[in-house]
């Protein structure tokens, strides 16, 4: 891969208590499906991000197990009901064991 | 007479060789999942429990021009309280080399059992979505997507 995967997350900076906010995430990753063949006919080995998870102040919020059918540069959006001020931690787990993380603060007032 | 026999045999051999070559050419480059594979996946997860219909809004395009990026949005009707929420949602594609697309695990903190992502579809096929509620009930939804350019192995 040319560049290390860079996660991008869009979370509103502030929300009212009880407000439903949408979180949108995107990470650059080629998501090699393990189904493709290179020019010499050999199967290109699978290398995908297989797990995405989101926690808020350490508590689990949302998880997605991705299969090779997920597009390159995977996009994931989901919702969170704001209740307290804190910090999101987003984690992407790669097949090769590496982990990519992003943190975003949310102020509830 | 003898010569003729040899001649026939050779022709037969050639014909057979041609058929074999044609079969190899026509044989699919990879195997694809089908409805049974999806049913088997669901059985593996939930045994013989039969999912009911309803509660799920599965939003996929009717026609996907590019099978490499097909948006998929799933929304399950639920109050998302501590006692009554959507535990898991599985999305399958019955015409891909592997049937699994994505599995979501929701918590009551989500407030809403809704998520979007983008998937690859190798060909025109059905998208099947199964939702598991916190009380163990299962729901299922299905939608067909026409794919004009395949997105697998291309």
Image (tube, coloured by chain):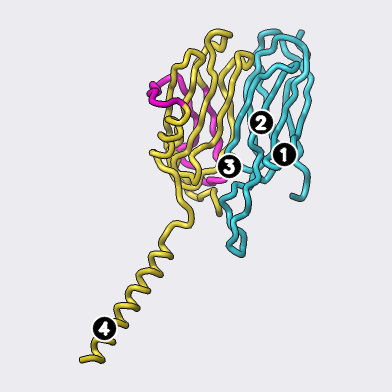
Chain colours: A cyan, B yellow
Earlier along the polypeptide chain: callout 1 or callout 3? 3
- Number of numbered callouts drawn: 4
CA gap, disc 2 and disc 1: 13 Å
In the visual, does A43 lie left or right of B141? right
Residue drawn at the location 32% of the way across and 75% of the way down: B15
Q: Disc 4 vs disc 1: Cβ atoms closer than 8 Å?
A: no
The residue range painted magenta reads B46-75
The N terminus of chain B lies in quadrant: bottom left
Circle on res. A97: 1
Q: Are marks 3 and 2 in contact (CB under 8 Å)?
A: no
Q: CA distance from mark 1 to mark 3?
A: 16 Å
Mark 3 against mark 4, which lies toward the viewer?
Answer: 4
> Which residue has dot 2 on it?
A52
Q: Earlier in the sequence, mark 2 or mark 1?
A: 2
How far is mark 3 from mark 4, CA to CA? 51 Å
Number of other residues with Cα within 10 Å of mark 2, as a class: few under 14, some 14 to 19, many 20 or more: many
Badge 2 marks a residue whose secondary structure is strand
Residue for badge 3: A68
Q: Relative to the observer, which residue lies in front, B9 or A40?
A: B9
Residue B149, image x and y in percent? 51, 50
Residue wearing tag 4: B8
Q: Are marks 2 and 4 on the same chain?
A: no
* Element marked by disc 3: loop
Tag of residue A42: none
Q: Is residue A28 magenta?
A: no
Marked residue nearer the N-terminal end (3 or 2): 2
B92 is higher (above) or lower (below) than B68: above
* Residue A30 placement (x, y as % from top left): 67, 46
Instruction: Pick whichever, B100 or B69, lies toward us.
Output: B100
């Amino acid at each position: 891969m040319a560049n290390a995967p860079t996660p991008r997350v869009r979370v509103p900076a502030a929300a009212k208590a009880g407000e439903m906010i949408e979180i949108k995430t995107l990470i650059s990753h080629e998501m090699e499906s393990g189904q493709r063949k290179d020019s010499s006919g050999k199967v290109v080995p699978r290398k995908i991000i297989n797990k995405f998870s989101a926690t808020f102040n350490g508590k689990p919020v949302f998880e997605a197990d991705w299969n090779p059918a997920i597009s390159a540069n995977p996009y994931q959006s989901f919702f969170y009901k704001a209740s307290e001020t804190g910090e999101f931690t987003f984690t992407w787990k790669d097949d090769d064991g590496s982990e990519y993380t992003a943190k975003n603060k949310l102020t509830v007032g | 007479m003898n010569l003729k026999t040899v001649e026939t045999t050779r022709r037969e051999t050639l014909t057979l060789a041609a058929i074999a070559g044609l079969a190899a050419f026509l044989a699919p480059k990879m195997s694809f999942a089908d409805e049974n594979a999806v049913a088997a996946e669901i059985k593996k997860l939930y045994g013989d429990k039969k999912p009911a219909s309803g509660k799920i809004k599965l939003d996929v395009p009717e026609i996907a021009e590019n099978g490499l990026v097909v948006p998929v949005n799933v929304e399950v009707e639920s109050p998302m309280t501590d006692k009554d929420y959507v535990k898991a949602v599985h999305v399958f594609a019955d015409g891909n080399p592997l049937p699994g697309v994505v599995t979501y695990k929701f918590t009551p903190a989500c407030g809403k059992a809704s998520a979007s992502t983008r998937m690859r579809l190798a060909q025109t096929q059905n998208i099947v979505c199964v939702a598991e509620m916190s009380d163990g009930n299962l729901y299922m939804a299905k939608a067909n997507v026409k794919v004009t350019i395949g997105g697998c192995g291309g």
